[in-house]
Amino acid sequence: MAKLEIKKYGEPVLRKKATAVSEITEDIKKLAVDMLETMYAAPGAGLAAAQVGVSLRLCVIDVSPDQKSPLVMINPKVIAGDNEVSAKEGCLSFPGCYESVKRFGNVVAEYIDLKGKKRKIKSEEWFLSKAIQHEIDHLDAKLFIDYLSEWKRKTIEKEIKRRKKAGQW
């Protein structure tokens, strides 16, 4: 296992639509394990492959308090959602940035697990639903700041520039 480098806002890979995983190889399984280790160490509740510089449709999520319920999703997609909720959201690629984002409180998603089995998950738990949507957005090159008003987005980008200049990004 290896802790991977989390790419921060401004890295081109975060704005590149991820390629579907065509085969679950040992490399894909290793990447998933390394991503989980990286996510737990950060600490975070989700991580998309793009956030570690790999443009593949793979993400990991664990919203359990004891970090013992990892979910590895390959080629995931949200197929249904309802009950929009607005709440604070952050991202490991935006350390220290939190803003309110409107997302579905309930979602149904399809994905493939590490054994190659097609699965469906139905979440009525808001935190898990939010994490699923957030990570799938990363695979589609969409970031949580894309949901914000232009003014809020520009304010965050200005703060990031300031932090970069000060060597804090």
Image (cartoon, helix red, strand yellow):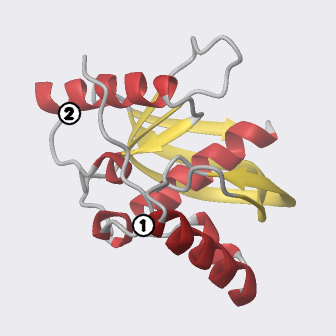
User: Residue 73 at x, y = what percent?
Assistant: 42, 38
In the foreground, 25 or 147: 147
Find numbered disc 1 in the image and state the secondary structure of the residue it sits on. loop
| Identity, as a three-letter code, of the amino acid under mark 1 | Asp
How far apart, in angstroms, are the residues tagged by discs 1 and 2?
19 Å
Q: Residue furthest bottom?
A: 150
In the foreground, 107 or 136: 136
Name the residue tied to disc 1. 140
Q: Residue at x 38, y 50 (%)?
A: 51
Q: Is residue 99 above or below residue 39?
A: below
User: Residue 106 at x, y = what percent?
Assistant: 77, 48
In the foreground, 94 or 36: 94
Q: Give yes or no for contact between labels 1 and 2 (Cβ–Cβ under 8 Å).
A: no
Q: Residue at x 30, y 70 (%)?
A: 12
Q: Residue at x 13, y 30 (%)?
A: 27
Q: Is residue 68 above or below residue 109?
A: above
Residue 28 is marked as: 2
- Rendered-image quadrant of the N terminus: top left
Residue 124 in sight here: no
| Identity, as a three-letter code, of the amino acid under mark 2 | Ile
Find numbered disc 2 in the image and state the secondary structure of the residue it sits on. helix
Q: Residues within 10 Å of mark 2 (few under 14, many from 20)?
A: some
